[in-house]
Image (cartoon, rainbow, N blue to C red):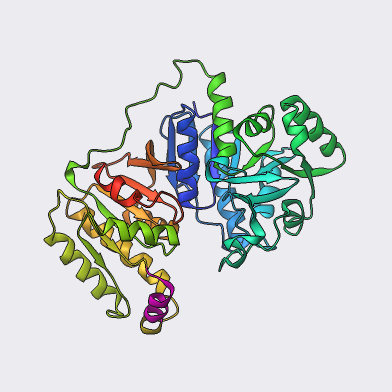
Amino acid sequence: MTHIAVIADDYTGGTDAAAALRRSGLRVVMLFGVPAPGSTLQNCDAVVVGIKFRSIARAEACEYVERTVAWLRENGVNRYFYKYCSTFDSTPEGNIGPVCDLLLTLTGARYTIVCPATPLHLRTTYLGHLFVDDTLLSESSMRTHPLTPMTDSNLVRWLSLQTESMVGSVPLNVVRAGHEAVIERVNGLVDQGVRHIVADATNDSDLDSIAAGHESAVLSGGAGLVEAVGRNLGASLPADEHPMGSRDAPDASSGTLVLAGSCSEATLEQVRRARLTMPALRLDPGDIPDADTLVDTAVAWNEAQDQTRPRLIYTSAAAEERRRGAMAMGPDTPQILEHVLARIASRAVEQGARRIVVAGGETSGAVVAELGVQQVLVGAEAAPGVPWCTTVSGDPISLLLKSGNFGDPDFLAKSASA
């Protein structure tokens, strides 16, 4: 029986949530994209549906969510969690507020809990403000994010720009008083007409207090609260209802293809270190400004490598190199390169590749779409929030999809050879 569904606003955010649920001891299936009508859900305790709607128009985002909820209901799932980034990536126009409003309408729930805090990734909330480590979100690098610049760390104020519903908060002293105190505070706010409630949390115990007792509400937030919900749910299931399978990291002896498209500082360092341990090819649109030629070049290079060893193909580049590439290829260079890497992945799978690591959220989405992957079983983590996923139909493919900022400096090298 599937006890809860998590709807995530991008693919790597979905794998982060799936890893958190599996860490709680649950059997987890993940789907990519809005589920196809008439398709069936694999047997699991929890399902995560990753959909790329974080930065699209709110009407389109809400349409995706409405279709997903309808499919989940057809498959017997009636409890929902809305997972967004722990840095609350959104703009004053949405999409977090509009999707929360929609989920309340679709489910008939009275309120949502809003808690992006994920202490594992140094994301915490205090007095309604979101911190990255010891820095206010609005004073971090997220302030200049190209798509979702976060200029205000006050989540009550920021969320109030996105919704006409009242927004309130549960301060840390109430959270520390335990889940009954949280419920009492929430009920008082709801009686005053508040529909979205921001909860403070700085550690996992706080998240456990927040997660309990909201079965009839819509919970939302980061992977930290997802895991707390999983712990709470797992404790209530009979021990024999969710036996874990042996879904460990797949055998590396068949070789691993690593594809890196993220240009985050973390991924750039991971690429630099991976190049020291494996054959590597950088695709530079400044030298080859044609997508088809880039794909053909990479495919030929990959086929010439020892297929039992890890190898790396990347478009990740520093700012000056990116500017040079955009001058040659045009303003859509980032999107073109995502699809170049996706086509390379598809060609590699056709040639027998069965173990692929992808660095970058947008690149991961393009690869999954190109491969036509719909459902995967979630396995062991290569790093916190980055689980191996295995396709459930046809000849199994093992995928490791990494958000750009996730993983330590040796992540790509270690995951490719582990």
| Quadrant of the rendered image containing residue 289 | bottom left
* Spot occupied by residue 261 in the image (x, y as percentages of width and height): 37, 63
Q: Magenta span: helix, strand or loop, mainly?
A: helix
Q: Is residue 17 above or below residue 209?
A: below
Q: Is residue 296 part of the magenta span, yes or no?
A: no
Q: Is residue 198 above or below residue 57?
A: above
Residue at the outermost right position: 192
Q: Quadrant of the C terminus?
A: top left
Q: Is residue 324 part of the magenta span, yes or no?
A: yes
| Quadrant of the rendered image containing residue 78 | top right
* Spot occupied by residue 94 in the image (x, y as percentages of width and height): 66, 59
What's drawn in magenta, residue-wise? 317-326
Query: Residue 1 versus residue 14: which sits nearer the camera?
Result: 14
- Residue for point 66% across, 27% down: 212
Give the number of marks: 0
Query: Residue 417 versus residue 297: which sits nearer the camera?
Result: 417
- The answer to whether residue 116 shows anywhere in this view is no
* Spot occupied by residue 383 in the image (x, y as percentages of width and height): 40, 42
- The answer to whether residue 254 shows anywhere in this view is yes
* Spot occupied by residue 97 in the image (x, y as percentages of width and height): 69, 53
- Residue for point 22% across, 66% down: 298
Q: Is residue 359 above or below residue 288?
A: above
